[in-house]
């Protein structure tokens, strides 16, 4: 008899999809094997479910496998409209069911440290923030293959998962990977301050303050020379054009 997928199993598989290169969504991937063991399923079934989510992602261009269930589609939509709650639940589930059963926890996936004991409510809130941030960073940087979307710099240590719509302005978009871009720390700061933006064709726009300093060697090298260049497109979770428009409108006085 075919075993039905539970909500927790779907959520764990979506979590896997968000942090795994498309080319590694196969039954021999150790992470898929490990998750399959936790869920008492075959690695093939877990890989196929992950590929169902890939098919739902417009950025993959139809890659993946059709046949996503109604529940799969509902969970995919929930990630868009209520990403903070989905990310928190997914990370907590991953910690409890996967990491706690792993022989050796990978450093970057180790359970998040608890906050200082300032009371149960504050500790819970702090842990949620950490989980959501961790989910978002991993999903965004993995989508861009750990490269800066502007320069192509392939050094994770220098990359930021930049929010397009700021964390403080829309809680529902806090963990939505389509609300993020992988940027070198310099470009992240410039983007956060509205000094650079992207148009509807994902091309880099330079602000007036930077233009006024275009004769500066550094400004010219890091910004003016890249004006009009198209951002490095991610393998999944394409940046949301409406979020980019929101960012441009917010800083329109600088252009």
Image (cartoon, rainbow, N blue to C red):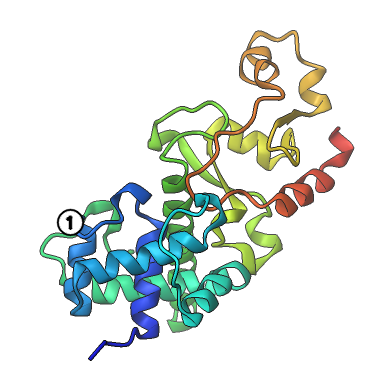
Query: Which residue is located at x 43 percent, y 70 percent?
Result: 127
Residue shown at 84% from the left, 47% from the top: 249
Instruction: Please tell me in which quadrant of the rendered image residue 123 appears.
Output: bottom left
* Residue at the farthest right position: 253
Query: In the image, residue 250 lies at what x, y percent?
Result: 82, 48
In this picture, is 179 found above or below 155? below
Vertical placement of residue 44 versus 191, above or below:
below
On the rendered structure, is 97 left or right of 252?
A: left
Which element carries disc 1, helix, strand or loop? loop
* Residue 114 visible within the image: no
- Depth check: give the residue in front, 255 or 22: 22
* Residue 208 rendering spot, x and y as whole percentages: 83, 26
Rate crowding at label 1 as few (under 14), some (14 to 19) or many (20 or more) other CA atoms within 10 Å: few
How many numbered marks, from 0 up?
Answer: 1
**Foreground: 249 or 118?**
249
Residue at (75%, 8%) from the top-left corner? 215
Quadrant of the frame with the C terminus:
top right
The residue depicted at 18 percent of the width and 64 percent of the height is 33
Image quadrant where residue 31 sits? bottom left
Q: Give 123 or 203, whichever is nearer the viewer.
A: 203
Give percent across and percent down for residue 143. 46, 47
Please state the horizontal and vertical placement of residue 246, each as a whole percent of the image. 78, 52
Label 1: which residue? 28
Q: Quadrant of the N terminus?
A: bottom left
**Does residue 198 appear anywhere in the picture?**
yes
Q: Residue furthest left?
A: 103
């Amino acid at each position: 008899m075919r075993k039905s997928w539970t909500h927790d199993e779907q959520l764990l598989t979506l979590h896997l999809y968000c942090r795994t290169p498309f080319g590694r969504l196969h039954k021999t991937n150790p992470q898929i094997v490990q998750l399959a063991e936790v869920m008492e399923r075959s690695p093939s079934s877990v890989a196929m479910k992950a590929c169902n989510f890939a098919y739902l992602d417009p950025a993959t261009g139809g890659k993946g496998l059709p046949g996503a269930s109604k529940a799969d589609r509902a969970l995919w939509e929930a990630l868009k409209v209520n990403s903070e709650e989905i990310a928190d639940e997914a990370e907590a589930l991953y910690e409890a069911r996967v990491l706690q059963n792993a022989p050796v926890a990978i450093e970057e996936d180790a359970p998040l440290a608890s906050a200082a004991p300032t009371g149960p409510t504050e500790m819970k809130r702090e842990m949620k923030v950490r989980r959501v941030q961790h989910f978002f960073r991993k999903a965004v940087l993995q989508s861009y293959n750990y490269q800066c979307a502007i320069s192509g710099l392939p050094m994770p240590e220098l990359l930021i998962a930049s929010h397009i719509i700021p964390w403080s302005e829309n809680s529902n978009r806090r963990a939505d990977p389509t609300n993020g871009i992988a940027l070198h720390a310099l470009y992240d700061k410039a983007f956060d301050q509205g000094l650079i933006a992207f148009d509807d064709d994902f091309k880099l726009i330079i602000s007036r303050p930077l233009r006024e300093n275009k004769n500066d060697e550094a400004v010219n090298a890091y910004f003016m020379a890249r004006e009009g260049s198209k951002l490095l497109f991610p393998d999944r979770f394409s940046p949301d054009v409406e979020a980019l428009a929101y960012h441009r409108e917010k800083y329109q006085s600088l252009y």
